[in-house]
Amino acid sequence: MAAFAVLLFPLCSKAQFNLSGNITENQKPLPGASIRLKGLNMGTTANQQGAYELKNIKAGKYTLVISFIGYQSTEKTFQLSADQRLDFNLQQSSFLADEVIVRSTRAGEKSATTYKNLDKEAIQEANFGQDLPFILNNTPGVVVTSDAGAGVGYTGIRIRGSDATRVNVTLNGIPYNDSESQGTFWVNMPDFASSVDNIQIQRGVGTSTNGAGAFGGSLNVQTSAPAKLAYAELNNSFGSFNTLKNTVKVGTGLIDNKWSFDGRLSRIKSDGFIDRAASNLKSFFLSGAYQGKKDLLRLNVFGGSEKTYQAWNGVPESRLNGDVEGMKAYIARNYLSDADAANLLNSSSRTYNSFTYKDQTDNYWQNHYQLLYARQFNDKFSFNGALHYTEGKGYYEEFKTGQKFANYGLDSVNVNGAWLKKTDLIRRRWLDNKFYGLTYNFTYQPQSNLNFTLGGAYNKYDGKHFGEIIWAQYASNGKYGDHYYDNTGKKSDFNVFGKVLYSPLENLSLFADLQYRRLDYSILGTEKNLNFLNITDQLNFFNPKIGLTYFISTESNVYASFSVANKEPNRDDYVNAVNGTFPKSERLNDFEAGYRIKTGKLTAGLNAYGMFYKDQLVLTGALNDVGESIRQNVPKSYRLGIELDASYLISRQFALNANAALSRNKIKNYLDYVYEYNDNGDITRTVTTNYAAPDISFSPAAVLFAELVYKPISGFAIGFQNKYVSKQYMDNTQNESRKLKGYFVSNLRTAYDFTALGIKNINLGLLVNNIFNRKYESNGYTYSSMYQGTTTTENFYFPQAGTNFLLSLSLKF
């Protein structure tokens, strides 16, 4: 830890020379224009007068890149040996840039919002075929996990301790979170990162956007813009656990400076670190666009399919610890069959998978259609909108033993004069859904210090949930193709928001953002426990946000904001609710304040936040009348924290990237439920325990990251990455026997770009994860029960892989 702490402090470097100038268009300043030194982590933005300055640059040869939305980017190579001034006069682009599609829902340097931008280069450097959460793993306050243990297949992400159901995700401004579960499943879009141009991560409530409310953060993803020239790419990765990724990308470039067409095909296969946790993933991305001087029309069609062996049960604590007596006790109280008992006792402690049936798989197909249009009416007024349609269909298959016929609506079976009430069977639980709607944004900037945005969306979701029995030891009166349960979920989501950004003084920006959101949700039919459902709910939310940013200088500013977010319950909250009860919506008041600085060598942000929840939905251990776990509203809870995000250029060869998130996450009063069972499996009594101010589950108090990057020669870089995540509790009792231990993991990433054999660019990359072979678990779950007055707690963990590698080869033509 001492060595890690040292990495968090930048080394001193002697100042050299300064570079300054103005960015204009026909002598008119262009405030906000981006200025950066190519290949280095050095850059800034032009101030209100269009002026910029980069300080303390070592003598040498550099290339300066200037870019601004709506204008042609320009580059200039120069030799720096003294203080120098370079002015640029940008020309308006002959076509409308793709950036206008997401501009209205993104935070900028004048927004009082905590955010981080990842550009295409950073995404490509981290993309070895793992799911998108692992590409975001090195950003502040982020914790990721993988069911299969190596980042391929089912993965999860938490931001500030909030899981994926509380992180708003949009693709080109279009909601991606599942309307009912509110989660995001990147396994359905494997290798999507290969078609992503940039990502903005907003922590906290952030700015108004479309889709489910942000309670931990937002991921605003923009897909790739067309290249100016025709291209072809082959990207391949191979590594541990027989992981293989193949990607082919082609594009026409701009045809007649107006038309472009791009495509991608990807395949990812992996055996996974966990036993039988294999994945077979495929995806595609097609895009065609017309780009005029004032219009942009783009059609995106993309999708994926996944077949993933289930590994979502985790490893029991006794198996993880190699506790033979504990495993035998686990076998006895859970009535494991001889085969399942042998599997538990004879498996590896860190790779055990309770599933052994050969087709115990999750299968899903999903296709997305996006029609995006933007128009710049004049230099003050613009519009962008989208029509979208998503269709998804899939099932997970399970082998189940000793299932009661009555639980599937079937009759008992008479075999040789004996009535059988149970059978072994194979079932599939299906989801067949459609999501469609429109989004829109109008932007009006009557003067340089005043900007208005009016936006919103109307989206509809139609989902079908049903179950089938495809095989049974005793078929009873069931027929192949029958649905033993069948229900629908329908949801409409309307929102409208208005934003204003006003600078009454050159150094001061004021921000206001008001959103109204209305939801209508209904569930009708029979659910998996054969209970009839007829649930309807209508919710109306008002989400105001205000903030201010004060520029201390052209290089630094301070900001503060207050935001309100409201969030609806998810499908399980409604379906599993105890009879006669109804889940309440959640409310969050979010306070953010911070300091940002951007000089020639240092880019840093320090942020403090307070997130105060009313009626947050959490798992309490409570069950409904059929034994399903339910979430219940807790009146008051909060998260307090500070975050640091910094990059420092030590020299032309060395750079340091570091971030830290320190937090306190509490429920003010928490009521925990434990049930006592008799020999028949019936509940005989309920024991409740009140806890004063326990930690919120899965909310580590410290998440730290540091990376030292070394670039000895042009085109070659090596990065040494370190990440520490402190202990997390798996429930809300803050019980030391129900926790994930803190872990410290180091990775090594290297890449070399060169040209040979007439190929435009060849990239060799190597990612070595967990180079010190740490044994750690990044996720888990727990539950407790009583029998004859004795409480038993079952803990399950998701071990992550030891030392493993991914080697990549990319060819660009």
Image (cartoon, rainbow, N blue to C red):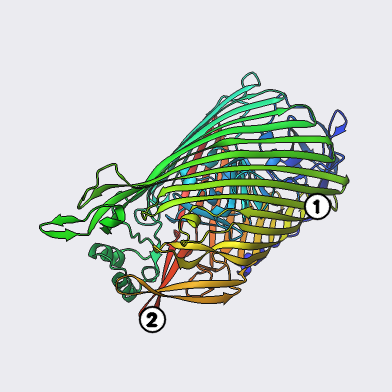
The circle drawn on residue 49 is none
Mark 1 secondary-structure assignment: strand
Please report contact status of discs 2 and 1: CB closer than 8 Å, yes or no.
no
Residue 702 at what x, y percent from top left?
Answer: 61, 66
- Kindly identify the residue that appears in the image at 69 percent across and 43 percent down: 106
- Kindly identify the residue that appears in the image at 69 percent across and 36 percent down: 441
Amino acid on which the number 2 mark rests in the picture:
Gly
What separation in Å lies between label 2 and label 1 (alpha carbons)?
58 Å
| Nearer to me, 52 or 282 | 282
Quadrant of the rendered structure where residue 340 is? bottom left
Residue picked out by circle 1: 548
Position of 626 with respect to 496 (left or right) is left
| Nearer to me, 580 or 728 | 580
Report how many numbered discs are placed on residues in the image. Answer: 2
Position of 257 with respect to 279 (left or right) is right
Mark 2 secondary-structure assignment: loop
Other-residue count near label 2 (Cα within 10 Å), few / some / many at <14 / 14–19 / ≥20? few
| Nearer to me, 52 or 567 | 567
Residue 655 at what x, y percent from top left?
Answer: 67, 53
- Kindly identify the residue that appears in the image at 37 percent across and 56 percent down: 529
Residue 282 at what x, y percent from top left?
Answer: 43, 39
- Residue 574 vertical placement versus 638 (above, below): above
Amino acid on which the number 1 mark rests in the picture:
Leu
Position of 785 with respect to 209 (left or right) is left
Q: Earlier in the sequence, mark 2 or mark 1?
A: 1
Most extreme residue toward the top is 256
Residue picked out by circle 2: 789
Residue 358 at what x, y percent from top left?
Answer: 29, 50
Residue 363 visible in the snapshot: no
